[in-house]
Amino acid sequence: VAHRLCCRSLQEVGPTMVGDQHSDTTLMNFLGAMKRKMPGNNFWEYYVSDAPRVVLDKLESCGYQVVSMTGVGQTLVWCLHKN
C-alpha cells in the first residue's frame, strides 16, 4: 500500500503543517502535531512547531521519502511517498 503525505512551511524554521482533518492520527501523534482550525477556514489542519528538516527526518525514520519539493509564494511544499 502506498501512502502520500505533503508538508508545507511558511518559513524555513517552522511552524510546519503536516496534515489535514483526514490524516492518520497515529502518524500525527508520532510527529507531535497539534490540530487547529484557523479563523476563516472551514477545515482543520495539523501542525508542529518544528522546522521542516526535523519533520522530514522523523518521517524518513518511518519509511517516507521525499519525491518532490516546490515553493509557492513564501510557502515551501514537500511531497513524500511510503511503500
Image (cartoon, grey):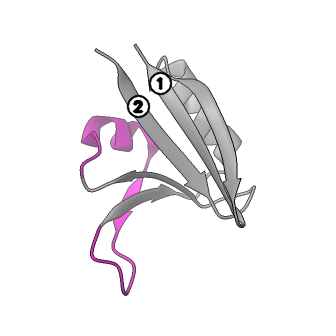
Question: What's the CA distance linking mark 2 and mark 1?
Answer: 5 Å
Residue 46 - label? none
Instruction: Work out which quarter of the rendered image holds the C terminus and state it.
Output: top left
Please name the residue shown 47% across and 58% down the image. Answer: 47
Q: Is 58 on the left or on the right of 26, as rendered?
A: right
Q: Percent from the top left, x then y, of residue 27?
A: 35, 36
Q: Secondary structure at mark 2?
A: strand
Label count reads 2
Callout 2 crowding tier (Cα within 10 Å): few <14, some 14–19, many ≥20: few
Q: Percent from the top left, x then y, of residue 22?
A: 24, 49
Residue indicated by mark 1:
81
The residues colored magenta run 22-43
Q: Quadrant of residue 21?
A: bottom left
Q: Amino acid at mark 1?
A: His
Callout 1 crowding tier (Cα within 10 Å): few <14, some 14–19, many ≥20: some
Q: Is 18 on the left or on the right of 21, as rendered?
A: right
Tell me if label 2 and label 1 are in contact, CB under 8 Å.
yes
Whether residue 33 is in magenta: the answer is yes
Whether residue 58 is in magenta: the answer is no
> Is residue 67 placed above or below 50 in the rendered structure?
above
Instruction: Work out which quarter of the rendered image holds the N terminus and state it.
Output: top left
Q: Quadrant of residue 68?
A: top right
Q: Amino acid at mark 2?
A: Arg
Q: Is 67 on the left or on the right of 30, as rendered?
A: right
Q: Tell which of 79 and 21 is nearer to you.
A: 79
Q: Tell which of 4 and 13 is nearer to you.
A: 4
Residue indicated by mark 2:
4
Q: Percent from the top left, x then y, of residue 13?
A: 73, 57
